[in-house]
Image (cartoon, helix red, strand yellow):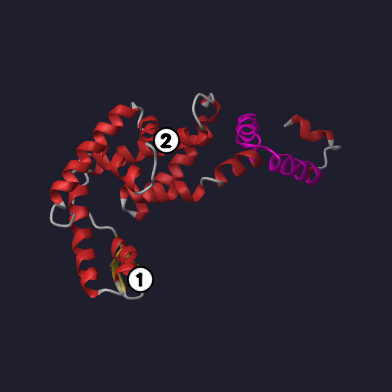
Amino acid sequence: MRLFWVLDGNPQAVRAYAIQTAAGMDESDLIRAAQKGDRDAFERLIRGYDQSVLRLAYNLLRNEEDAADIYQEAFLRVHKNLNSFRFDCSFHTWLYRIVTNLCLDQLRKKKVRREEPSVVETSDGTRDRLDMVHEERAASDPQRNVLSGQLRDRIQNVLGSLTVRERMVFEMRHYHGMRLRAIGEMLGTTEEAAKNCLFRATQKMRVALGDFV
């Protein structure tokens, strides 16, 4: 940060120069600047992952309050441990590894059961989020609407019966479209291990959804 003080120590000029400099940085530059204490660089770095981290946490936990807690804790850990980042993987992978590990701990702690609700309060009362997701697609076809609801319930039951790691891998692969190699890296395991975990989860899902597929 000493570089910024060449501007005659004027705080406004210093901040303006810092923001302008950060704007022209790529992610690696932002990380290195943030590691040296540049707050603007750090804020710019995490801003690009803000919504994706919250979305990942919610999709894995299916609970708004828990997801918000994980979101806060994840960025606190990033801030605390950024100096330990050594560029041996992408920042995206490193950040998601923190998020997924926190989610794993949370799921294990709560011993998630299949009956865990994923609901939200709306003007029409309590609604299941998955109902709201599928509603628009199914509304034009009453029969499809019924089948969609049944399928949703069946999927939720199966997800609840998976091991924590199987559920994590399945959701990251099918709901987030992540590659198995990236999933393995985030979970601190190999691509092959993630692939085997996904296979087990998929087999369980196929057996449970046999009459739907």
Q: Residue drawn at (16%, 43%), measured in percent from left and top?
A: 204
Residue for badge 2 = 98
In the rendered image, which quarter contains the N terminus?
Answer: top right
* 23 sits to left or right of 163: right
Q: Residue drawn at (19%, 54%), measured in percent from left and top?
A: 213
Q: Residue drawn at (22%, 48%), measured in percent from left and top?
A: 159
Image vertical order of residue 152 relative to residue 1, above or below: below
* 128 sits to left or right of 207: right
Based on the displayed image, in which of its 4 quarters is residue 144 positioned? bottom left
Q: How many marks?
A: 2
Whole-number angstrom distance, CA of label 1 to CA of label 2: 32 Å
Expressed as whole percent of the image width and height from the top left, the position of residue 40 reads 66, 42
Residue 27 visible at all: yes
Residue 161 visible at all: no
Residue that sits furthest to the front in the current view: 213
Based on the displayed image, in which of its 4 quarters is residue 202 positioned? top left
Kind of element beneath mark 1: strand
Kind of element beneath mark 2: helix
* 20 sits to left or right of 91: right
* 139 sits to left or right of 19: left
- Disc 2 crowd, CA 10 A, few/some/many (<14, 14-19, 20+): some
Callout 1 amino acid? Thr
Q: Residue drawn at (28%, 28%), measured in percent from left and top?
A: 193
> Is the stretch drawn in magenta largely helix, strand or loop?
helix
Image vertical order of residue 118 relative to residue 190, above or below: below
Question: Which mark sits nearer the N-terminus, 1 or 2?
Answer: 2
Expressed as whole percent of the image width and height from the top left, the position of residue 104 reads 31, 38
Residue range corresponding to the magenta coloring = 12-39
Mark number displayed over residue 122: 1
Callout 2 amino acid? Ile
Expressed as whole percent of the image width and height from the top left, the position of residue 82 reads 54, 31
Q: Is 54 one of the magenta-colored residues?
A: no
